[in-house]
Image (cartoon, grey):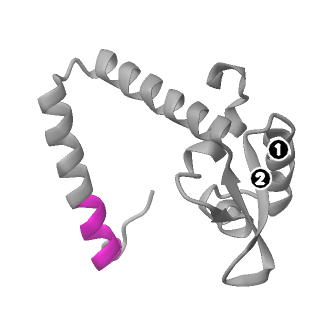
């Protein structure tokens, strides 16, 4: 099911583990809100997402995965993990260790920000 999705659709779905505001998705994906709207239209037509009012701010819209969308997202995650496992050659235990270390790095960056002068 997930293989029938376009790259922008897959990318947006990976950010929808929980319902998210469309404006926040645009910011997170570093794209224009109109792009998120277009991809949301495509996913809505495929019955993968629903648009609903944000319960915290009725002026804003958020996207939520449908049951079919949740299944497709789970399929995507399984495929990504399998591909990474094959690419990296890491055992399941090593992948768990790597994930733990990456979580620590992410937490440190979130707490402290990037070092002064750091550029990507």
Q: Is residue 43 above or below residue 29?
A: above
Please state the horizontal and vertical placement of residue 28, each as a whole percent of the image: 60, 61
Residue 43 part of the magenta-drawn span: no
- What's the distance in space between the residues labelled 1 and 2, CA to CA? 6 Å
Q: Earlier in the sequence, mark 1 or mark 2?
A: 1
Q: Is residue 14 above or below residue 57?
A: above
Exactly how many numbered labels are in the figure? 2
- Which residue sits at x=80%, y=45%? 39
- Which residue sits at x=19%, y=23%? 90
- Considering every residue shown, the one lying at the far front of the view is 67
For residue 69, side relative to residue 101 (left or right): right
Q: Which residues are magenta?
A: 105-114
Query: Label 1, on which residue?
Result: 44
Please state the horizontal and vertical placement of residue 99, each as a whole percent of the image: 24, 44
Q: Is residue 5 above or below residue 18?
A: above
Query: Label 2, on which residue?
Result: 50
Please state the horizontal and vertical placement of residue 72, each as a whole percent of the image: 60, 31
- Which residue sits at x=18%, y=38%? 96
Please, what secondary structure does the residue beneath circle 1 have?
Answer: helix
Q: Determine contact: label 1, label 2, CB under 8 Å.
A: yes
Q: Residues within 10 Å of mark 2 (few under 14, many from 20)?
A: some
Please, what secondary structure does the residue beneath circle 2 have?
Answer: strand
Secondary structure predominantly adopted by residues drawn in magenta: helix
């Amino acid at each position: 099911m997930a293989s029938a999705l376009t790259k922008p659709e897959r990318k947006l779905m990976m950010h929808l583990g929980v319902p998210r505001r469309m404006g926040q998705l645009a910011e997170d994906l570093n794209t224009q809100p109109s792009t998120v709207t277009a991809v949301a239209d495509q996913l809505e037509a495929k019955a993968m997402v629903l648009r609903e009012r944000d319960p915290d701010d009725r002026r804003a819209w958020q996207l939520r995965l449908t049951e079919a969308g949740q299944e497709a997202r789970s399929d995507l995650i399984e495929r990504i993990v399998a591909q990474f496992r094959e690419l990296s050659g890491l055992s399941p235990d090593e992948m768990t260790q790597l994930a733990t270390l990456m979580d620590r790095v992410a937490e440190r960056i979130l707490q402290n920000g990037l070092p002064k002068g750091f550029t990507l």
